[in-house]
Image (cartoon, rainbow, N blue to C red):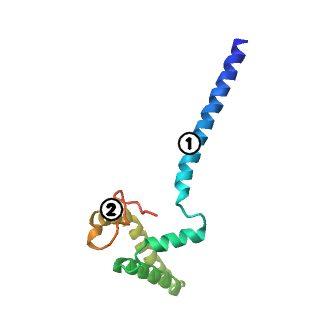
Amino acid sequence: DDAGDDDANATTTASSLGDVVEDLKEQIFADHKAGAPQSFREDVAAFTSAVDWSETWIRCLGLWHLTLWAMFFIFRNNYLVQCGLFFNVATAVFLSEWLNGLASTHWEKFSSQDYFDKRGVFMG
């Protein structure tokens, strides 16, 4: 009989602990969601307003992406050029963490705001 009471108490404690955890999650996410965009359109609007598109380095980065996309499209039937482009992109990805860390250290020299993470992780 005492074993049944212990099981009931353990179940009650576990469920009340689960309720506390759920309440904490709801509070944390409510605070987070309060100012967060709620739709894809709002996400895009928040992103475009957060970035200073007049900065030269951002424009160059965008132009590099467009040029790369165009080269992949133009040379889509040329295996050697595709291989060269692939290895250049793979090298850029390999170096991106290091470059991002370097940019995090020196962002004041080329940017009006810090878009970079000291650990080299791209921020969203």
Residue 118 picture location, percent across and down: 33, 58
Residue 106 image-quadrant placement = bottom left
Viewer-nearest residue: 89 or 84: 89
Q: Position of residue 15 (x, y in %)?
A: 65, 32
- What residue is shown with label 2? 101
Amino acid type at image mark 2: Gly
Left or right: 118 as drawn, with respect to 124 = left
Q: CA distance from mark 1 to mark 2?
A: 34 Å
Q: Is residue 37 above or below residue 69?
A: above
Q: Are marks 1 and 2 in contact (CB under 8 Å)?
A: no
Q: Tell which of 68 and 116 is nearer to you.
A: 116
- Establish if 3 lies above or below 116: above
The residue identified by callout 1 is 24
What residue do we see at 44% from left, 84% from top? 67
Mark 1 packing: few (<14 Cα in 10 Å), some, or many (20+)?
A: few
Residue at 42%, 63% in the rendered image: 122
- Residue 15, compared with residue 53, is above or below; it is above
In the orientation shown, which residue stands out farthest toward the bottom? 74
Q: How many marks?
A: 2
Local SS, label 1: helix
- Image quarter hosting the N terminus: top right
**Label 2: few (<14), some (14–19) or many (≥20) C-alpha neighbours in 10 Å:** some
- Of labels 1 and 2, earlier in sequence is 1
The residue sitting at 45% across, 79% down in the picture is 65
Mark 2 secondary-structure assignment: helix
Residue 97 placement (x, y as % from top left): 37, 62
